[in-house]
Image: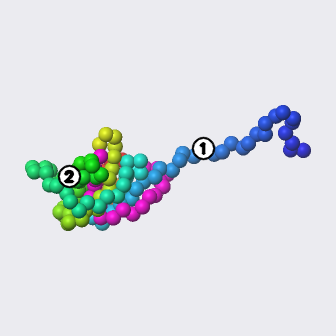
Amino acid sequence: MGQTPAGASPVLPALPETPPALRACLFGLGGLRLAVDVRNAREVAVFDEITPVPRSPQSLVGVANLRGTVIPVVDIRDLLDLPVQRPGRSVRTLVLRDDPLQAAVVVDAVLGLEPFDEIRPPEPSEAGPAAGRIAP
């Protein structure tokens, strides 16, 4: 009763096929809660020295040295229609990489990691003035 015949392998029940949850790194900027795919988030870095770049766009704060590599430091507030603020002396950033590109994005706070079942674009009422600039 319920035994496997000699020489036969037991049959295991099939596991339900569920895609693995996506993971995002959450960060705060200008009162917004934003997320980036954790595969692109490299580290949190605080820069005390940022070198300005003459004639650069407003979103480029400058460049900084990250362990021997010079990377751009960008502030995306303008892209999100948030009030632009020049960072103070110490700048908290989230270093993002999408090979071969790497940049440090200014953030107010890093909120942690969060699993997601799906990615969905924000509802028009949720997105506010930056609705056309947020990638689905």
Range of the magenta residues? 102-121
Magenta span: predominant SS is strand
Q: Position of residue 77 (x, y in %)?
A: 23, 58
- Within 10 Å of disc 2 (Cα), the crowding (few <14, some 14-19, many 20+) is many
Residue at image x 87%, y 35%? 6
Q: Position of residue 2 (x, y in %)?
A: 86, 44
> In the rendering, which numbered label is found on residue 72?
none
Location of the N terminus (image quadrant): top right
The residue type indicated by label 2 comes to Val
Q: Earlier in the sequence, mark 2 or mark 1?
A: 1
In terms of depth relative to the viewer, which is nearer, 90 or 59? 90
Residue, far front: 68
Residue at image x 42%, y 54%? 24
User: What residue did someone put label 1 on?
Assistant: 17
In terms of depth relative to the viewer, which is nearer, 99 or 11? 99
Seen in the image, is 102 located left or right of residue 26?
left
SS for callout 2: strand
Seen in the image, is 20 located left or right of residue 66?
right
Residue at image x 29%, y 43%? 101
Residue at image x 87%, y 36%? 5
Q: Is residue 111 magenta?
A: yes
The residue type indicated by label 1 comes to Glu
Q: Position of residue 33 (x, y in %)?
A: 35, 62
User: What residue did someone put label 2 on?
Assistant: 63
In terms of depth relative to the viewer, which is nearer, 44 or 105? 44
